[in-house]
Image (tube, rainbow, N blue to C red):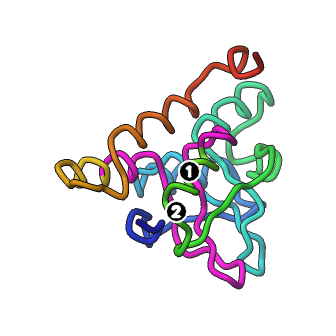
Amino acid sequence: MKVKDVMRWTVYSCGPGTNLAEAAKIMWDYDCGALPVVDGAGKVIGMITDRDICISLATKNRPASDVTVWESISGAVYTCSPDDDIQDALKTMAVKRVRRLPVMNANGELQGILSMNDIVLKADEAKGWKTPGLSYDDAIRTLKAVCVHRELARR
């Protein structure tokens, strides 16, 4: 099974200069918990999550309209492509402990997003196959790796 069989092709994003109020509104309007952050050339330069917004606002003590996405994102961006094997994407998610992977084409352009939600729902659809490309065990094993507490992950 390929990433393109599981991913969402419709993806919403924001720019680094987007303020947190706007980013939160996009998440609310489109029922998503994270947005890829893209530069002027359409390249993914980060991810912003609803948690990032909450922590940023709580620690900066400034209105959401005055804090940019760029001030609130951290860490590297891990991606996959539509033609990657889903098992490889699951390994990336587990090892890097991320719930979502932006899906990029060969030119580095954003094509969609692969999320744990989509994986769990697709694993549900695969139930009963003799050789599923994505099993419940695959989904739960990945989710468990992503969810492990930081202090346990360091051991």
The kind of residue tagged 1 is Arg
Q: Is residue 101 magenta?
A: yes
Vertical relation: 152 (above or below) 22: above
Highlighted range, magenta:
94-121
Q: Earlier in the sequence, mark 1 or mark 2?
A: 1
Q: Secondary structure at mark 1?
A: strand
Q: Quadrant of residue 46?
A: bottom right
Looking at the rendered structure, the secondary structure element under dot 2 is: strand
Vertical arrangement, residue 142 with respect to residue 61, above or below: below
Mark 1: few, some, or many residues within 10 Å (few <14, many ≥20)? many
Q: Residue at x 73, y 15 (%)?
A: 151
Q: Are marks 1 and 2 in contact (CB under 8 Å)?
A: yes
Measuring from the top left, give residue 12's x and y in whole percent. Answer: 52, 65
Residue at 62 percent of width and 64 percent of height = 80
Residue 131 in picture, x, y percent from top left:
29, 56
Q: Which residue is mark 1?
A: 100
Residue 122 image-quadrant placement: bottom left
